[in-house]
Amino acid sequence: MININSCLQEIFGAAIQAAYPELENPPLVVTPSQQPKFGDYQCNSAMAISQILLKTKEQKVIPREIADKIAKNIPANECIEKVEIAGPGFINVHLRKDFVSKQLSSLLMNGVQPPAIGKRKKVVVDFSSPNIAKEMHVGHLRSTIIGESMCRLFEFAGYDVLRLNHLGDWGTQFGMLIAHLQDKFPDYLTVSPPIGDLQAFYKESKRRFDTEEEFKKRAYQCVVLLQSKNPDFIKAWELICDVSRKEFQKIYNCLDITLIERGESFYHEMMKDIVKEFEDKGFVQVDDGRKIVFVPGFPVPLTIMKSDGGYTYDTSDLAALKHRLCEEKGDILIYVVDSGQSVHLQTVFAAGQMIGWYDPKVTRVAHAAFGVVLGEDKKKFKTRSGDTVRLIDLLEEGLKRAMDKLKDKERDKVLTAEELKAAQTSVAFGCIKYADLSHNRLNDYVFSFDKMLDDRGNTAAYLLYAFTRIRAIARLANIDEQMLRKAAKEEVLILDHEKEWKLGKCILRFPEILQKILEDLLLHTLCDYLYELATTFTEFYDNCYCVEKDRQSGQIVKVNMWRLLLCEATAAIMAKGFDILGIKPVQRM
């Protein structure tokens, strides 16, 4: 698909260059127009150029004159019908109907294809990352959903994506867990211990660690033996990790998440080399037995070795950063981690730059931060007893609520048992994901089942329902896929009605929406766009007959094929948008 905004930027870039060759990197601003009377797009560079000419050349030129000069230098192209200069110096752009029509036909024949990205780059995304022996809670929900969606977007755009689960699977907490395992299941080496509830197991071991001095000493010895790779202790560690893994996988299966596990333990062998590298380059200071590294611009130093010779999160995060840059050869690294870790991650990234692992002009290392999940009381989301909400409970509650909603609408009377089950999971998990992704990730968001399952407004319930309706239009007119494919090759999409024109342009904005998200990593833009597309479609459908029927008999009199093709193009874009957001639509709802 062609990114129309990029095309117009090229055209206006060339026009500005021709009109003002003396300007270096002149400002280039092209945006979709907010109102039809201002055309389809606007170039708003004239005002900024006027300021530059005044500052650098001391020339006073009114923006309207500049806009006029730019307009006169627009090169020959296939997309602009005409331009008009409005107000103080806005250039309103009207697109050619045949150009838009041709792009829509191409979309219908070739499917939804990503805009070209140039060289195929490698993207490493670190997301989800729960801790072993602790259950996934609502805090992990955001990282998991946002990270999965980012991976899908980069994969669709043609990047090579490595999806990493940076599990908390190493560290001092394993000492107490292994000591408790030895006491509770002394034959753990031969008989697999039936740890059903790992959360309770963790709490018991923590209570003993805090109250029994003898147990605490043993726990510390267990850590030393584990870190020295004693086979019996490695076996105990693996057993505990396996129980956790199975629990995590249940959630990943529900939410359709794909990850490669690469926990902190993976980097353990690399940590001594990291310490040595920072020492060799003279960055290490010793403070009270600890080895610390000060990074310019950051007040708190990184501790890369504790006074007892143990490593820290700082060490493992540096090792992971180096491995992703130097071994995995990542061109883009994205850490989907909550905002609370912002200073820590920025310090780690700056340390990586300082020691020469990467140049930010060449390699992009980004922290895709996100806010916390709040309850409806606008406080941190907790259960009634004040505990953190378990993620598995939340998903089960979502399934129950979705089924109640479908039964309220009496869908159980028209759908088969299988269709009802498919609609239930589609709505439950689709709504949970969409509620998260449709908020700006930088803000906290209020978790409310009532709001997310509402089928009015910008929710997954509304969009899934709209999508199912659009898909049904051709089916109810007895037009099958083969007929649509044939029509896509032969029919010209007429865009004479203002609502057809509005919908056609909205469909073709998809590539520029994706391009923006690849740059700023803010997925709510895609949700806003899908909602705008669905509402623009409704306006079109209410004003333009796709299928005309006899008022008396209800018989189909006429099928307006070009309008059915517009329905198909809308559905194709929505389906791809859902896919990127990790939402599974259903045929019947």
Image: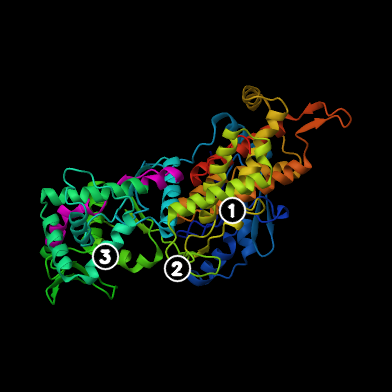
Dot 2 or dot 1: first in sequence order is 2
Give me the C-alpha separation between circle 1 and circle 3: 45 Å
Q: Residues within 10 Å of mark 3 (few under 14, many from 20)?
A: some
- Residue 381 image offset from top left, x and y in percent: 48, 65
In the image, what residue occupies the spot 59% across and 53% down? 528
- Residue 550 against residue 386 in the figure, above or below: above
Give me the disc on residue 206.
3
The segment highlighted magenta reads: 249-277
Quarter in which the C terminus is drawn = top right
Residue sitting nearer the eye, 60 or 272: 272
Question: In the rendered structure, which amino acid carries the disc numbered 3?
Answer: Lys
Nearer the camera: disc 2 or disc 1 = 2
* Local SS, label 2: loop
Whether residue 235 is in magenta: the answer is: no
**What's under tag 1, amino acid-wise?**
Asp
Lateral position of residue 534 relative to residue 396, left or right: right
Alpha carbons under labels 2 and 1: distance apart: 34 Å
Specify the label residue 386 is tagged with: 2
* Disc 1 target residue: 528
